[in-house]
Amino acid sequence: MTQPVPELAPLTPGGQRVLDAASRLFYERGIHAVGVDTIAEAAGVTKKTLYDRFGSKEALVVSYLQHRDARWRDHVAAHLSRVPEPGPDRVLAIFDAAITWSDENSPKGCSAINARAEIGDGNDDHPVFPEVSRQKAWLLDVFEELCAEAGMPDPRAMAQAMMLLYEGAIVTVGMTTFAEPFVIARMWAGRLLGQA
């Protein structure tokens, strides 16, 4: 698949504790609501250790997003491995992966979307923005590749439709607008794929 995950440097035990604590706190409370003092305390390290390992809070946020993305990609790969033959079912495997991922890992929606929304406009040079764009571009590329393998007449357009269904579902998960949005998105994705 295109758009590889950046090489993630191995972490020391203290660095891993910082990342684990920051990941939990950033996702549960938000990036702005969580300071480095809170993260260091939750990780059982000093602020110096946090800064020695990550350099800045912004770099820690990017690391949080990258590590979550790496776990998500592994989850997607596991689902795709269960449907090795090209076709609509392989495209739908992305939705199946999201269904099994979202309850446990994303009850508040997409961490990347949430981070992008929280940073807000006027911060275009913030390092979160290219990371979020990279993650979303990767998923769109995956959908396009799977749609091309499935023989869709316009793989890019179908991938964009799949992405819209996926993104709408993940936002709906976070908003709790209605139950099982990925199940519904998968159903409509299947209908679109079947009509192509």
Image (cartoon, helix red, strand yellow):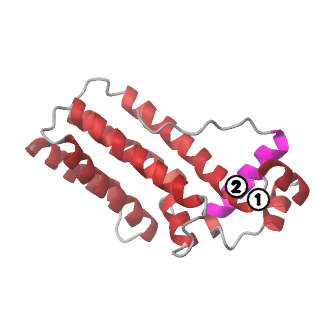
Q: What's drawn in magenta, residue-wise?
A: 12-27
> What is the x, y in percent for residue 2?
41, 35
Residue wearing tag 2: 59
Above/below status of 125 relative to 154: below
Magenta stretch holds residue 69: no
> What is the x, y in percent for residue 39?
78, 61
Q: Are marks 2 and 1 in contact (CB under 8 Å)?
A: yes
Amino acid type at circle 1 is Ser
> What is the x, y in percent for residue 50?
83, 54
Residue wearing tag 1: 56
Would residue 180 be visible to someone looking at this image?
no
Disc assigned to residue 30: none
The CA span between labels 2 and 1 is 5 Å
Find numbered disc 2 in the image and state the secondary structure of the residue it sits on: helix
Residue 33 lies in what quarter of the image?
bottom right
Q: Residue at x 66, y 58 (%)?
A: 61
Above/below status of 139 relative to 145: below
Q: Residue at x 69, y 60 (%)?
A: 58
